Image: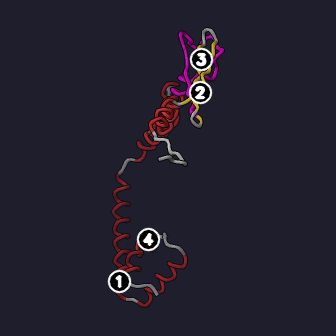
Amino acid sequence: MMKCEAVRDNLGAWLDGEVGHPEADQIRGHLEGCPACLAEKKRLDQLQSSLQEVLRLEAATVPFELFWNGVERRIAEKLPWRLQLLDWLRPVFYPGRLAWAIPVVIVSILGLLSLDQILPEWPWVNKNNRTAVESIDAFGFNVAVFREYDTKTTVIWLFENQDDEEQSSAEPIQDDNPTF
C-alpha cells in the first residue's frame, strides 16, 4: 500500500496517464481507501476541467486561419541555395559540436610541420638549408646522426658520454689489498 505523500506526489501524473500500470493500480487502490487523497484527486479534476473550459473559450477567439496559412506558405516557399546551404551547415557549428575542430587543427598543423619527413622526395616540400641532428643515449655510449638534405649527407658519431668519465675520475679508487 502506498503512503499518502507518495500518492499526492504522483497524482497529477496519474490523472494525465503518465504512470506505469503497477503504480497506477496502487494509486487507484489507495484512493479507494483514503478520503483525504480522494478529495485531492477531486480538487485536481475540478481544476483541470476549469482550465480546459477557459482554454476552449480563448482558443475560439484566436484566428488560427492566419497561423496555418503562414505555415503552409513557409513550407511551400523555396529558399535561395545560399540559405539552404547555411541551414544545412548550421548544426555542424553549434558550440557542442565544435569539439572536433580543435583536434583537427592540431593534427593538421602537425601534419604540415612533419610533411618533409613523411614525403622528403616531393618537390614542393621546402628543403632549403635543412639539416637534422638526432642524438641517442644507449648504456653510456652516445650516437649522434647529422643529416643534410641538399647534399644527401649523413654523418654518424659514436662517442662516450663525457659526464660519465668525469664522474668516474672523481670517484676514489678502492683497492682490495691495501698496503700500509
Name the element at disc 4. Answer: helix
Q: Which residue is mark 2?
A: 143
Span shown in magenta: 109-137
Task: Name the residue: 64% across, 14% down.
Answer: 122
Q: Nearer the viewer, mark 1 or mark 2?
A: 2
Q: Earlier in the sequence, mark 4 or mark 3?
A: 4
Q: Residue 96: image x %, image y %?
A: 45, 42
User: Label 1 vs label 2: CA separation?
Assistant: 91 Å
Q: Earlier in the sequence, mark 4 or mark 1?
A: 4
Q: Earlier in the sequence, mark 1 or mark 3?
A: 1
* Contact? badges 2 and 4 (CB < 8 Å): no
Q: Residues within 10 Å of mark 2 (few under 14, many from 20)?
A: some
Q: Residue 41: image x %, image y %?
A: 38, 79
Q: Earlier in the sequence, mark 2 or mark 4?
A: 4
Disc 2 marks a residue whose amino acid type is Val
Residue 37 position by quadrant: bottom left
Q: Which residue is mark 3?
A: 147
User: Label 2 vs label 4: CA separation?
Assistant: 76 Å
Q: Which residue is mark 1?
A: 39
Name the element at disc 2. Answer: strand
User: Label 2 vs label 3: CA separation?
Assistant: 13 Å
